[in-house]
Amino acid sequence: MIRSGAIEKKRLRELYRYRILDTPPEPEFDGLCDLVRSLLGADAAVITFQDADRSWCKASAGRHVVSLPRSTSVSEQAVIAGEAVVYEDLADEPLFREHPLVQGETGMRAAVGVPIEVKKGLCIGAVVALFDEPRQISIADIENLLRLTRAIIDRLHLRRIRIERELDQIARAKKDAEIAAQKWEIGKQRRLLEQTARLARIGGWEYEVGADRMIWSAEIYRLLELDETVAPPNLTALLSYCQEEAAGEVKRLIVRVLTRGESFETEIPLTTQSGRRRWARCVCEAEVQRGKVVRLLGTVQDTTLQRATEEEVNFIATHDMVTGLLNRAVFQERLDRALAFRTPARTVGLYLIDVDHFKSVNDTLGHHAGDVLLAEVGRRLREAVGELGIVARLGGDEFALMMPDCGGESELVAIGEQMMRGLQEPIAYDAESIPVTISVGIARAPSGTPADQLFKDADIALYEAKGEGRNRFVLFDRAMREAIELRHSILRAIRQAIDRGDLRLHYQPKYSLRTGVLAGFEALLRWHRPDGFIASPGFFGIALDDPQLGLAIGDLVIREAVRQAADWRARGVVFDHVAINVATPQFRRGDLCDCLTAALDEFGVPPAALMVEVTENVLLSKVADEVQTTLSQLAGKGIKIALDDFGTGYASLSHLKDFPVDLLKIDRSFVATLTEERESRSIVRGITALAHDLGIPVIAEGVETSAQRDMLRHFGVDFGQGYLFSRAMLPAQIETSGLVSMVATQARA
């Protein structure tokens, strides 16, 4: 049954934004269909999008399909369900029993479909795999289909971004064309008016030099708002209608005409009899008889409206229409000019300003509210800065301030504080009160510095301000640039390392301190660099914190650790478990339990053979609720949970009660000073006693000396790991070195 109402309208509106319907075949989507068949062993696969009354097929493999009735398609059932749907025998399903794709010798008998969910709750289509025979659909089949569907969603988002950019470019081009047309029209009108004025004597006048007498047409009376029944004033009195700043120049031109007989044409500002300001184009020629000027002839054209149109066009071309501030192009020109103006000790200051959480205002209150907010922010910034600098809107929620001669850091800080104070009060919108804060990056540079470099420095400072929690300003220093360059270098190197397979897992054995028996391994990530150096995560922790790379690395660790556990079990290596470290981004994604169980199922490893290590900081993060839910799910599956680095953070003891913990891990910082510091001994003894009272075994990491091992054993610590027993090694090294058995003998001594 096809859904109707507001949700369906919203879903269709979202679908149409991608402009995918009725488009020609694309190799990208066809290739994904082929990949669906290959991964699932399907006989046919389709990618469909659910229009108002049809299920339109963008790509198919194994069976040519163009369009189907929407209500009787597997795709529609997946869209309605909002999750994977499975039909192991379509002939048993009343909805599909009579379907043309099911009937006949070549009919399809089994299907699995996954919705294409581009936004939460908005499914615009589905990916469906079809089979010639009834088939039991596995979890792995569904997982593979889900992964491919995410790839399709990524491509759709890229397509939409490309469409929006194209539309934006078209809009800008149209605006530019309109401005150019306006300018051309103004030029054409000016030329026409000038020609008409000269030929037709519109607004004409004459001045008889000998008699000092003026003759005007009616148009000039109307221009100056004078009574047409009154005789025109003489030439000297006429000059009084010119505004003060232009009167001197007009006098000079008239003198040249009277003395030399030279004609002139100029545009002058006038003040009418009633005090109104107007512009007029004046043309004057001399009539010369026997070498003497006897008469002046001319025309006057009111150009006030034309002048206003020119100013309006110029304003549109140079200003942002929402805020009335200068636009990016003009701001860039002013910044270039300020930096190019070389004077000793001159420093140019640049502020890059972002409105915090502006997108949420647009999403919740609408774009009109967003425009009101931007206009008010622009007004307050201009008010805070006054005449000291130039404020502009660069686009979106980005503003900029330039101080052409800013002095020292104290002046930059003072302006920054002034801007922050100016935005403390919420902005009123209808019945709403919108709180507004800004993040500001500040940089300065001497004249002669390239503008691009100053922009980069301010942008780096803005990045720091956002990273420190927003609602603040940060001054740029060179260390920030070096940190950004180092970050980009590390991220680039780790992406290459993932592609080359240079990120590998080393395994450090864990032993029972009481019996010396091998208890398990901890999987530790290492980067095998091309120069031969093996780096620990301390060298590339930036990559682990990156939202995309961190997840990619986490997925790599899960799959490789479970695969290695399966390999060892298959070859008879005796161990209890392999432990992996899980970071906050993997909990934030929300599918950690599914990823782990899928890997265990794929490689046939029992859940008890896997341990997940979580630090105190993860328990205290913003996703603590998701962490607790996920850990409970993992514990329910039989996967062990270890609390890592215990005692170094700020976790409450209640976490030992609230979270399912199978093992408590004492941080190496306490073990390192165990034999020298009484405080460390007291902490280790207390943690061990507390954990044992709760029925939780304890392991100490970083055990490097026999004295540490003996003291830990005396305190009742159950397990240990560290260089005393073995360093972390590649699987092949563990299997061939004989170190495990040798360490086991040493541990029992």
Image: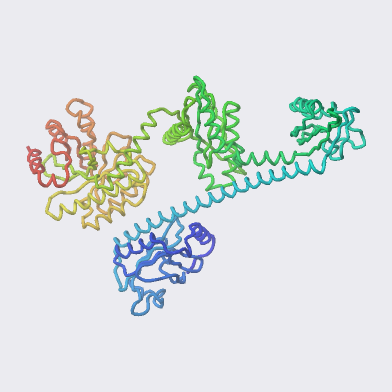
Q: State the image coordinates of residue 334 (x, y, percent, origin top left).
A: 55, 32
- Residue lying at the far top of the rendered structure: 344
Query: Which quadrant holds residue 260?
Result: top right
Q: State the image coordinates of residue 255 (x, y, percent, origin top left).
A: 79, 25
Look at the image and tell me whether residue 715 can be seen.
yes
Going by the image, does 635 lie left or right of 22?
Answer: left
Counting labels gives 0
Q: State the image coordinates of residue 317 (x, y, percent, origin top left).
A: 61, 41
Query: Which quadrant holds residue 139?
Result: bottom left
In the image shown, does 695 or 282 lie closer to the viewer?
282
Colouring style: rainbow
Going by the image, does 612 lie left or right of 102?
Answer: left
In the image shown, does 34 or 677 lie closer to the viewer?
34
Q: Residue shown at 37%/28% (left/top)?
A: 479
Look at the image and tell me whether residue 695 can be seen.
no
Pick the quarter of the image with the C terminus.
Answer: top left
Going by the image, does 174 lie left or right of 487?
Answer: right
Q: Residue shown at 52%/36% (left/top)?
A: 437
- Residue lying at the far front of the rendered structure: 290
- Residue lying at the far bottom of the rendered structure: 104
Q: State the image coordinates of residue 2 (x, y, percent, origin top left).
A: 49, 67
Going by the image, does 122 lie left or right of 178?
Answer: left
Q: Is residue 116 above or below residue 546?
A: below
Q: Residue shown at 46%/61% (left/top)?
A: 124
Query: Which quadrant holds residue 456?
Result: top left
